[in-house]
Image (tube, rainbow, N blue to C red):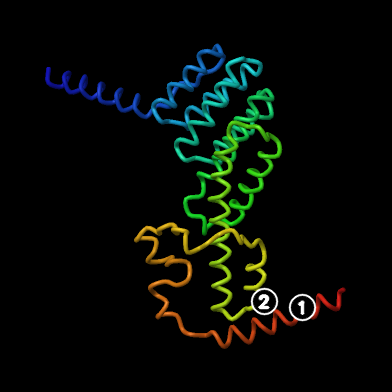
Amino acid sequence: MKLKSYLVAGSVIFIVLFAGCAKEVEEYNKPAMYWYSKIVQQISQGDLEKADSFYSSLQGEHIGSPLLPEATMILAIAHMQYEEYLLSEHFLDEYIKRYATQNEKEEAEFLKIKSKYMALPNPRRDQALIDLAIKEGENFKLQYPNSMYTEVINTMLVRLELAQAALNETIVDLYNRLDKPKSAEYYKNIKPQDWIVWSDIQRANTAWYREWFEGDGTSSWYEFLIPDTQSVVSRNSVAQEDKAEGENNETK
């Protein structure tokens, strides 16, 4: 009797373990509404990876479904909410290329710029993204001069230009410390923002755990550990800059 009980218990445990390790049943050939409901369900549960997978099934099996545009926009906004900005832009691009009407394009283009803007919590780390966001913001204003989003775009552009100017100022200071005056002058004149009164600007605060390593953009707490090799860097840098300038003059 005991042996029989052990066998039954062992069988139950084996079945439970096997079922837990088994792969999910592959689903296919479902109605468009089924895939759409699965997408919404997974987003509500915070599993965007599965939602993306169900979107692929919806798009693959029902390429002409009227549910696709809405599902695409829902996923774009969901990824933005979860700070997955590259994926958000991917779905927005898909929406603009395939589904958006002229009026809907305006909103989608605005969301793309917003996604780039929100992807910049640390402006000193991504100069190219700042430049691209500013360019797209200016293009948006030209393309939609009477847009309801114009003031929001203007606000984002002002903050992006402040971030860009602060970044360039940091680079100028770096080259000054390395005794590279020509490089410093280049970044000083690359895009001057004469309208900025720096004394009136409250700079972004760096989190204490990042400030230990990044400093304020001009120096760090471990600066005293770095040997002072400015004279060596200076001679090489100036020579290289003069050499490059001479080659440019010869080319001309």
Instruction: Say which of 51 and 207 sits in front.
Output: 207
Tell me which corner region of the image, top left, top right, bottom left or bottom right, holds residue 155: top right
Question: Which residue was labeled with disc 2?
Answer: 182
Location of residue 236 in the rendering, given as x and y in whole percent from the top left corner: 64, 84
Q: Residue at x 29, y 26 (%)?
A: 14
As drawn, 41 above or below 168: above
Q: Residue at x 57, y 77 (%)?
A: 176
On the picture, is 197 further left or further right than 131? left
Q: Residue at x 52, y 18 (%)?
A: 35
Kindly indicate whether the residue at mark 1 contacts the one at mark 2 (C-beta within 8 angstroms). yes
As drawn, 205 above or below 217: above
> Along the polypeptide, which appears first: circle 2 or circle 1?
2
Location of residue 174 in the rendering, given as x and y in whole percent from the top left corner: 54, 73
On the picture, is 91 further left or further right than 223? right
Instruction: Say which of 18 and 169 sits in front.
Output: 169
Alpha-carbon distance for marks 2 and 1?
A: 10 Å
Which mark is in front, 2 or 1? 2
Q: Residue at x 47, y 64 (%)?
A: 199
Tell me which corner region of the image, top left, top right, bottom left or bottom right, holds residue 8: top left
On the picture, is 252 further left or further right than 143? right
- Per the image, label 2 sits on a secondary structure element best described as helix
Tell me which corner region of the image, top left, top right, bottom left or bottom right, holds residue 29: top right
Location of residue 186 in the rendering, given as x and y in whole percent from the top left corner: 67, 70
- Per the image, label 1 sits on a secondary structure element best described as helix
Q: Amino acid at mark 2?
A: Lys
Crowd rating for badge 1 (residues with CA inside 10 Å; few <14, some 14–19, many 20+): few
Quadrant, the N terminus = top left
Question: Which residue was labeled with disc 1?
Answer: 245
